[in-house]
Image (spheres, rainbow, N blue to C red):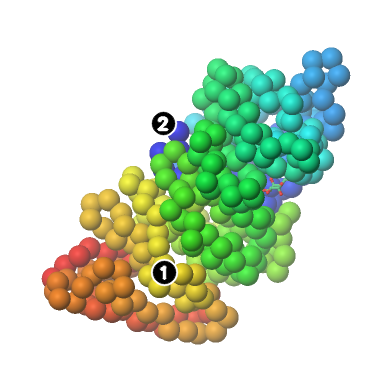
Amino acid sequence: MLSRTPPMGFNTWNTFGEEISDSVIRETADAMVDLGLRDAGYEYLVIDDCWSKRERDPESGKIVPDENKFPNGMKAVSDYVHSKGLKFGMYSCAGTRTCADYPGSFDHEFLDARTFAEYGADFLKYDFCFKPETANGPLLYRKMGMALKACGREILFSACNWGSDEVNTWIRSTGAHMYRSTGDINDSFASFRDIALSQVDNLAYSAAGCFNDIDMLTVGMYGKGNVGSAGCNDTDYKTQFALWCMFGSPLMLGSDIRKMNDYILSLVTNKNLLRINQDEEARPAFASSGKAGKTPCFVKLLSNDEIALMFANLTDEDAHVQLYFENIGITAASGFGLEMKDAFTDECIGVKKEFMRMRLAAHDCAVYICKLKK
Ligand code: GLA
């Protein structure tokens, strides 16, 4: 079964945009292995938009790689990625053109799925630009879902229609293994905060086999690249990564992995946070207040009777963040409290009862893995 837990990997779009090439992919594959990212679970290396020529091959009708960017063809790139113990991902679009105006798969779904299988692709991101007006959105995803089933290779289907057409109510039935639920992220605190908060009511539309994808991470971009803006600082990235882990989103790195610094590397390989994201029960998180707010506490039940808690200050000033245990089902009368381990420091802070309140700097967060204890 694919996508038993949220898929993890790297995608070229956030940093490279159209500046992709054979060497960028090979160097990224090398870095994913050398830095230990592959061993931490980041297995898919996905080439996003802009990899093909502007038009299909007139004779075969196939999409063809741009030979200036990929002079050895796509199979050679895929073989290299596989030789590093990684999986290879491709990109296309349900409309007539991709979002960056390259050929889309509309009316060529079965041919394109077979082409991706010939490349040795293990993953397909499937976008939603240039959809003919009369075309039915859900049916376009059903078509590619069927085409992938017919292509003779197991390919993870990553849908990307940005949450339109009430996607969460039907996408799982198309065979998709993950689905973008929001518009595009950019590298700013406001962007990722708003994306995350927009999905607080949709966290339960995510489970083993098909996960709610809140977009590729900007963690470690510092304003550089293709979706750069003001950029973020390390505190912001800590909170972004913790939110993505708590929300059970796929974890697709988007920064230039070849230049990843030690802080970002330790953040994205943090064992406690990855355990929360990859928990086998894949239960949705919920907000303790029942709704999205700027000083939320998120709760996610894990296997082995553990409970993950995240306290976040999503305001631009210092703030108190608090949780009343009664609000998440731990009654005072039960006598139980929570034994808490800090996910960032591994420090055990003992058993807390009835409530937890803390002061957090602007944009900062705290994450704990807890057990019920008297
Ligand atoms: C859309 C998607 C992005 C990226 C671009 C590529 O905007 O949402 O993630 O794939 O297209 O053009």
* Quarter of the rendering containing residue 194: bottom right
Quadrant (top left/top right/bottom left/bottom right) for the C terminus: bottom left
Circle 1 is placed at which residue position? 290
Circle 2 is placed at which residue position? 1
Give the x, y percent position of residue 328.
30, 69
- Disc 1 secondary structure class: loop
Give the x, y percent position of residue 255.
62, 53
Disc 2 versus disc 1: nearer the observer: 1
Q: Residue furthest top?
A: 59
Depth check, front residue: 164 or 245: 164
- Give the alpha-carbon distance from disc 2 to disc 1, as whole Å: 32 Å
Depth check, front residue: 252 or 266: 252
**Which residue does the image show at 67% across and 52% down from the upper left?**
14
**Which residue does the image show at 19% across and 77% down from the upper left?**
332
Among the two numbered marks 2 and 1 on one chain, the one whose residue lies closer to the N terminus: 2
**Which residue does the image show at 64% across and 34% down from the upper left?**
139
Which class describes the residues within 10 Å of circle 2: few (<14), some (14-19), or many (20+)? few
Quadrant (top left/top right/bottom left/bottom right) for the N terminus: top left
* Disc 1 residue lies near ligand 1 with CB under 8 A: no
Amino acid carrying mark 1 in the image: Gly
Whether residue 8 appears in this view of the structure is: no
Depth check, front residue: 369 or 205: 205
Image position of 63 (left or right of 276): right
* Quarter of the rendering containing residue 111: top right
Amino acid carrying mark 2 in the image: Met
* Quarter of the rendering containing residue 271: bottom left
